[in-house]
Amino acid sequence: MFQAKRKKYGRLASCCLGLAAGVVMLVGCGPSLSYTVPQETIQRLPKGSRRSVFQARTVVTIAVDRKATIRRQKEVIKRDIEKIYQKMEKAKKDGDKHLDLELTMLDLQVDYLKEKLDHQETLQEMADRDLILSKAQFELAKAKLVKKHSVAFDGEVSEFEAQLKDIREAADEFRKEVDSEAAELKTVEEEWLAAKKKYFSAIGESSKGWWTE
């Protein structure tokens, strides 16, 4: 279901992505910005003022943590898929009278988990975009503070504002794709859950809490 999108997003993730006529480039796996405030410039700010601008870095930290969470989730899903394959092999050996229902349920679960794994790739790209967005916000905050304190700096606040605007618009546009894909994933999940309910009802364990099995 997601193969076409996967190819499109994969190309974006694996090569440089230009936004707004080269204002922003995603190079390899790490994002970079065209407009940044050098660290030595920040060091020339009054010490008391630096604390306020570096509070903006909290958003960057959150974005980094989100990327790490997605990576961990992908590994969990991969392990879950392997466990389902093992269940399928065991079910075939046991030869239960409800084997067909069980295999249908497990097949649909694998389909769901594979689609979910694909969706994690999309979420990972969204996380990349959110990260560069948070960095753009951070750089704008620094640029404004530098200008406020009249520290020598060649950049213009308007350049940082335009950079942030372009990145935010691109992120918002991609977020629509993420939401659309999530809705498709929900449909696949519902198909699996329906088969799961049917199987557990057939074996007389519908009251056991089949959704947790």
Image (cartoon, rainbow, N blue to C red):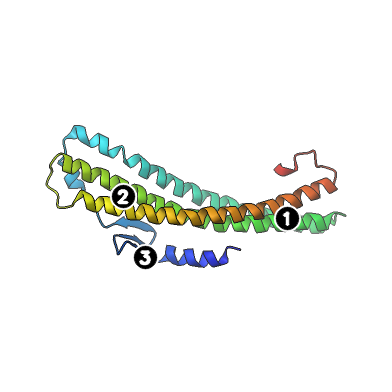
User: Residue 191: x and y, percent?
Assistant: 70, 54
Give the image quarter of residue 45: top left
> Which residue is under mark 1?
106
Report helix, strand or loop for mark 3.
loop
Residue drawn 29% across the image and 60% down it: 23
The residue sitting at 17% across, 43% down in the picture is 147
Name the residue that disc number 2 marks.
Answer: 136
Whether residue 163 is situated above or below residue 149 in the rendered picture = below
**Residue 173 to residue 14: above or below:** above
Report, in whole angstroms, how far the alpha carbon at label 2 lies from the one at label 1.
Answer: 45 Å
| Quarter of the N terminus within the rendering | bottom right
- Relative to 54, is 33 above or below? below
Task: Give the image location of residue 42, x and y in percent.
Answer: 19, 43
Q: Nearer the viewer, mark 2 or mark 1?
A: 2
Would residue 71 be visible to someone looking at this image?
yes
Please name the residue that numbered disc 3 is placed on. 16
Query: Which element is circle 1 on?
Result: helix
190 horizontally vs 172: left or right: right
Outermost residue, top direction?
A: 48
- Mark 2 or 3, which is nearer the eye? 2
Q: Where does residue 140 sit, x and y in percent of width and height?
A: 26, 46
